[in-house]
Amino acid sequence: MSRGGARPGAGRKKGQKNKLTVKRAQAMKKVARELKQHNPQLFEGDAHALMMAIYKDPKLPLSIRLDAAKAASKFEKPALSSVACAMAPEPASTHPEPGDPGPEWRERIAKRFGEARRFWENAH
């Protein structure tokens, strides 16, 4: 008899929700039904839909509409993220070309002006 390892037909089927997720969704639906019985004018959509309804309603004051639009914009348009870029230093040349001021000078420029080194090497 085998012990452990993958067995055909074992485990949760692909796309099937786990038990906790199913129980949580059922509990949320039950609470929503109870709330709707006590207050039939509750909003049907999710938080994003509510924010959209608020900022699109011309009857509301502009300050409220702007606050709702600011909150909803995070979900409608993704924020730009910064990207890290690491450049490996190139080995210093042991034989400078004619007219080349030398590796020490290039290193000083690179420290002082950041990307000036790349422009210098591409230009010469």
Image (cartoon, rainbow, N blue to C red):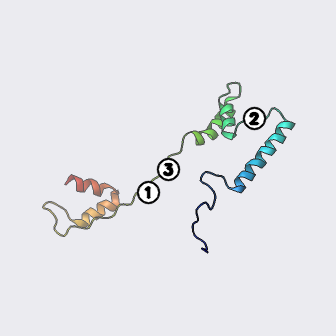
On screen, residue 122 versus residue 114, left or right, reads: left
Query: Residue at point 69% right, 40% down?
Result: 47
Q: Nearer the viewer, residue 54 or 7?
A: 7
Tell me which label, 1 or 2, sits earlier in the chain: 2
Mark 3 and 2 residues: CB-CB less than 8 Å, in contact? no
Query: Residue at point 59% right, 42% down?
Result: 74
Q: Position of residue 96 (x, y in %)?
A: 16, 65
Secondary structure type for disc 2 = loop
User: Which label was assigned to residue 84?
Assistant: 1
Q: CA distance from mark 1 to mark 3?
A: 10 Å
Please identify the quadrant where the N terminus is shown. bottom right
Q: Amino acid at mark 2?
A: Phe
Residue ranking furthest to the left: 98
Q: Amino acid at mark 1?
A: Ala
User: Which label was assigned to residue 74?
Assistant: none
Q: Position of residue 38 (x, y in %)?
A: 87, 37
Q: Is residue 111 above or below residue 49?
A: below
Q: Nearer the viewer, mark 1 or mark 2?
A: 2
Tell me which label, 3 or 2, sits earlier in the chain: 2
Q: Amino acid at mark 3?
A: Ser
**Residue assigned mark 2:** 43
Q: Position of residue 58 (x, y in %)?
A: 67, 25
Residue ranking furthest to the top: 59
Q: Residue 30: name its quadrant.
A: top right
Query: Residue at point 26% right, 62% down?
Result: 106
Q: CA distance from mark 1 to mark 2?
A: 43 Å
Q: CA distance from mark 3 to mark 2?
A: 34 Å
**Residue assigned mark 3:** 81
On screen, residue 29 versus residue 76, left or right, reads: right
Q: Nearer the viewer, mark 3 or mark 2?
A: 2
Q: Position of residue 105 (x, y in %)?
A: 25, 64
Secondary structure type for disc 1 = loop
